[in-house]
Image (cartoon, rainbow, N blue to C red):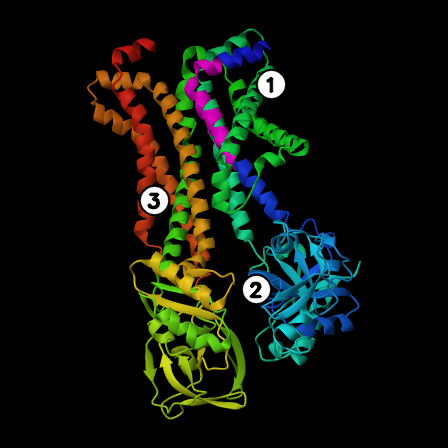
Amino acid sequence: MLVIKSYFRYLLRNRMYTLVTVFGFALSLAFALLLGVYIKNQLSIDDFQTKKDRVYRLEHESTEFSAPIATDLKNLYPEIEDFTRVFNHSGRISKSDGKKIKFDYLGVDGSFFNLFSFPLLKGDKNEVLQTIDGIVLSKATALRLFGSIDIVGETIFIDTEKKFTITGIMDDFPDNTHFNKQDALINLAAFKKIWQFENILEEYGWCSLSIYLLERPNAILSSKASEILKNFKKDFWLYKEGWANTVVFTPLKEVYFSSKEGNGTKSSSMALISVLSAIVFLILVLAIGNYINLTIAQSTFRGKEVAVKKLLGGSKHQLMKQLVFESFILCFMAILLAVVLAILFEPLVNNLLETELQFEQILNLRSILALLGAVSVIGLISGLVPAIKISSFKPIEVVKGELRAKSRSVYSKVFITFQYSVAIALLSCSWIILKQTDFLRNKDLGFSKDNIVFMEYLGSNSQKKTIKNELEKITGVQEVSLTWHSPLDGGNNQTFDFNEESVSFQEIAVDSSFFNVFDIKIKDTKTAYAGNGVYLNETGYNTLQLNEQTSSFKFHDEELPVLGVVQDFNFRQLKDQIGPLMIRQQDENRYPTNLFVKINGTNLLEITEQLKSVYSQLIGDVEYEIQFVDSAINHWYEKEERTGKIISYFTLLAVAISSIGILAMATFYMQQRKKEIGVRKVNGASTVQMLALLNIDFLKWVFLGFVIGVPISWFVMSRWLENFAYKTSMDWWLFLAVGLFTAFIALLTVSWKSWQAANLNPIESLRME
């Protein structure tokens, strides 16, 4: 107890040391705790699935296969116990007399609940998905439509006229699964009547769904990958024509971190988890390093205490025990403050990471014990290094005043260099990420994206002209276009043979207004108009090696005239190069999927409200969304922007911790040099000269941090930018600006103490010495 009281008196006497160590430690631990919870949550995705160790997603360069592939594999390989195919879709669901509500649903096999452990609240998991007209609603959707979950046997309608019977109610998909939240599940065969696609389960050419396989116990399904690949290359067109070249069985626990987008799934980046883990580690290293550095520096002022205890018979072992115990006390104080700060900062981190951490809910006995264990390790590491150093002080050095002179040349330099290497590297990386995101959002895509709104087309085929005409009557509306697919979704893939080679085009269908709405220029090929004529982009035109003499091409069994060539424009995210594009004409029989409206730049809110009003009157009581094209495109790069913001925020935290540490180090550094400063002042040194002398020692270590940090950030960002087809430049001035900013912060931090020391009366300095 006496030791504790003595240590608390020491902390109260040395408020700067106490503030920096406790608050700096607590701030670092608070964010480390929050990021630790987030990382744990991310790594626990799909942990609740009871068969997670036996479920795999079949993949090649992407995740899309045709339906009969799953059946073929199960029949050929006894290692496969079961499978489910998954296809995500959206539409409108309603009761016979109710509003048509937008909903997302999955087409799956009847074995879905055998592979996945999603709770079924009503119905038998072996029966609910067996019929072509059965549907399983989520709890939220059931309550929204009927106000109850006791509705098995009730009737609902998909897209107005497709009748389904409710066979079960499932609990809402939880957040900790790789599947997006879904409103319903139906049997995949139900698309036979939804789309009139009678051979959907037998069609090898339609590669648009994901396949999940359940491995038999004790089997090794991955051992069959090479054999399956060999068979695919022989029999499956996707592999025969070179569009796929690999067979991969991705374990369910790894699907969430896959870079390949699946049906109805969400994903995260293992690289982001690694970055966050590295940030947690660096923050803790900076905080622990600050503590060690400051404790050793402060120990030069505890020299007399150490010397007296040694002269009175205290052993080195006893001193080490005392100093490590003091470290545990300080860490315990810091963790209490860290928990409070973590709760306060939780909303900020939730917003930044787009998650719901609910930090208070993890404060159970197990997590508290784990936290105390981690703090004990940190306390031991933080206390052991300075304890070894301080306990080795020789009393005679303290009496002679030699200890401070030694300390001055040894302590802090390496750690200051490390701190600013980290800060400069993180600042450079976050700046480049945000610069790349800004570049992507503002790059000319080859079409106009401003003042264009779009909606899902929800009218009937016979209403197309009426809807278009009525919307164009609205004041402020310049033009309306109906399209099947668009530059926002990348179009539909079409693969065909041309000159004995397989070529792949994306395909959209548009009306004549499309080119005006998006301001896309057309080069006329002087080909006579034909109803089946198409437009190609420049890349597609060159891919087919067309010219003025050959202005048509064979598409399967049909000869398609090329009516014009449009300038290349991006119809995918800028991670990909522009590929071949075929633009068909939106004829009377083709049902459009989108409605684009070009409006003038004034009274946007008023015009959009009028659009909603008129459109709703035309399509009836149907739920829909209205969006701006530029906002939808900006959404493409939210992940990159979020990564940049995450690194930026924690870079600022790292700079703050470094600045707190360098401020405290400067305080002790100036105290150590009081005698030297006094002598120089007596000998005529000016305040400016003293400032330069005192600051240069810190700035040279910051400069060394710059020399180390810049190559690291340049290498890391060069690798990251390789993921983009279009990228910003890493200009030299950016790194210089980061270095100057860091030097300015360091100079600002140190100069306060340097100014105080340089203006101190030399008589007082020498008298105290």
Q: Which residue is mark 3?
A: 738
Q: Which residue appears at 37% of the width and 22% of the height? A: 667
Q: Amino acid at mark 2?
A: Arg
Q: Secondary structure at mark 3?
A: helix
Residue 243, by quadrant, is: bottom right
Looking at the picture, tell me which residue is in the foreground, 63 or 303.
63
Q: Which residue is mark 2?
A: 92
Looking at the picture, tell me which residue is in the foreground, 674 or 335.
335
- Which residues are the magenta region? 10-31
Placement of 698 over or under 161, stated as above or below: above
Q: Amino acid at mark 3?
A: Val
Q: Mark 2 and mark 3 in contact? Answer it, CB < 8 Å.
A: no
Q: Secondary structure at mark 2?
A: strand
Residue 668, by quadrant, is: top left
User: Nearer the viewer's eye, disc 2 or disc 1?
Assistant: 2
User: Nearer the viewer's eye, disc 2 or disc 3?
Assistant: 2
Q: Which residue is mark 1?
A: 321
Tally of numbered tags: 3
- Quarter of the picture containing the C terminus is top left
Q: Earlier in the sequence, mark 1 or mark 3?
A: 1
Question: Crowdedness of circle 3 by 10 Å Cα count: few (<14), some, many (20+)?
Answer: many
Residue 693 seen by the camera: yes
- Quarter of the picture containing the N terminus is top right
Q: Earlier in the sequence, mark 2 or mark 1?
A: 2
